[in-house]
Image (tube, rainbow, N blue to C red):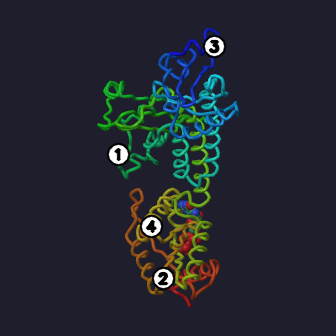
Amino acid sequence: MEMTSHAPLASFIDLLMDAVFAVNADGCVVFASASCERIFGYTPQEMVGKTMFDMIVEEDRERTRQSARDVMLGYPQFHFENRYIRKDGQIVHIMWATRWSPADQLRIGVARDITGLKRAESMQAVLYLISEAAYAAEDLIALFKRIHQIVGTLLPADNFSVTLYDEEKDQLSFPYRIDEVEQTSDVSKPAAGTLCAEIIRSGQPLLLTPETMAARLEELQVTAEQNLLCWLGVPLKSHKGMIGVLMVKTYVGGACYSEKDQELLQFVSTQIAIAIERQQMQSGLLHMAQYDQLTALPNRGFLYDRLKVALATARREQGRLSVLYLDLDKFKQVNDTLGHDIGDLLLQEVAKRLKQCMRESDTVARIGGDEFVVLLPSISLPEQAELVAEKVRHALNSPFNINGHYLNIRSSIGIALYPEHGDNEQQLLKHADNAMYLAKNNDHRSRIDS
Ligand SMILES: Nc1nc2c(ncn2[C@@H]2O[C@H](COP(=O)(O)OP(=O)(O)OP(=O)(O)O)[C@@H](O)[C@H]2O)c(=O)[nH]1
């Protein structure tokens, strides 16, 4: 080879931390300094004769060819960046300073390994994206989807899951799980005896590679899918403690995870945990603002919101809707004779029975002490509202067994219809309330008071 003729100062050049290359017009290496082994994994002897373009990551090739053409036209390149596949398969980011030597008809380039810098940059960007997602996501699932996308820019993440841990109940749940092989619709299956449970127990990340898989699974007494290649899970820890596990895995034919991937995932896991916790808190606050604490039914404010939406739809489609106002009779006596706690339990049971006899699209709300409102957002005939009222009365008719106390409860129901009894929320609720009072003072039947 012509190595010596092109490298009179090779001994000095070999001391440089950057690698020096001489490449002919076709991209074939005619000289490489010693550092090329540290950066690219190939010794200078292995490098000489290779075509640089063959080692470049596919997506960077065309850009690099253009840059090489510019160099040969006499335009030196100072900060040209591209990526190479090292001998061990890892990707290395390079920054080049290159010029053309017309006398030698060679491109002379200095390659600096900027992989660490690039990683730091992309980590910074990823951390920013995660914290941005924490504010932008509408709910937890939207946040998980976004985190999935973001993690996918760091490492292979076709199979990705978030497992949440409820420390109080010592329970795991799977709110987000994307798996190209294992299809399961049950996202709340308890996960005891799984690899995720092991991470929660130990608080440590877990990396299973083809070399360690069998032994680790046996040691942990956990079974895994036959064609699993790699499994990587990291704990999600917040200031409160362990809140879950983030997991990625690959199947045979896919990529392998390394210790570096584990570090990467662990590094972003704190930010992810903070984002999840923030979203959980927000959802919790929203839930508190919209739902009644005792019965978990929508509260008055939330009922108004839903009624407003239903009215808008009914107006647009010239449809009907109905509101049922329900008040328990002599509920005060339950409190007074058996105590407030029994009264509370009775209200919870009433809420349960009301929900059971409604459709998914209906809303049952608790708007005050023993007052409930049912919103039927789409009925075609007024009689349908009476039928529902009858169903409700029937549902509440059989005695309630509250801690061994058999309670017979009667209720009064007033009905309002749109458009007959009002055009807005207030009018309709007022009408149903009045009709309820009339029912209470007369025959306790439901009334459509016109
Ligand atoms: N246990 C319990 N009682 C409540 C709660 N909120 C309100 N109450 C009580 O529910 C009762 C409701 O009052 P009323 O509707 O006048 O009582 P009532 O005996 O059903 O009266 P009528 O409807 O006229 O038959 C009051 O005694 C309140 O103190 C609650 O969250 N839990």
The Cα atoms of the two marked residues, 4 and 1, are separated by 38 Å
Q: Image point 46% across, 24% down: which residue?
A: 87
In terms of sequence position, does the residue under pointer 3 or pointer 4 come before the other? 3
Q: Is mark 3 within 8 Å of ligand 1?
A: no
Callout 3 amino acid: Ile
List the single residue furthest toward the front: 103
Q: Which mark is residue 181?
A: 1
Q: Is residue 71 left or right of residue 394?
A: right
Callout 1 amino acid: Val
- Is label 3 in a helix, a strand or a loop? helix
| Few, some or many residues within 10 Å of mark 2 (<14, 14–19, 20+) | many
Depth check, front residue: 448 or 330: 448
Q: Which mark is residue 13?
A: 3
Q: Which mark is residue 355?
A: 4
Q: Quadrant of residue 158?
A: top left
Of the two numbered discs 4 and 1 in the rendering, the one whose residue sits closer to the viewer: 1
In terms of sequence position, does the residue under pointer 2 or pointer 3 come before the other? 3
From the top left corner, tell me how far across and down residue 295 is, in percent.
Answer: 51, 60
| Few, some or many residues within 10 Å of mark 4 (<14, 14–19, 20+) | some
Q: Which mark is residue 446?
A: 2
- Is label 1 in a helix, a strand or a loop? loop
Q: Marks 2 and 1: CB-CB under 8 Å?
A: no
Callout 2 amino acid: Ser
Depth check, front residue: 326 or 138: 138
Residue 394 position (above or below residue 35): below
Callout 4 amino acid: Lys
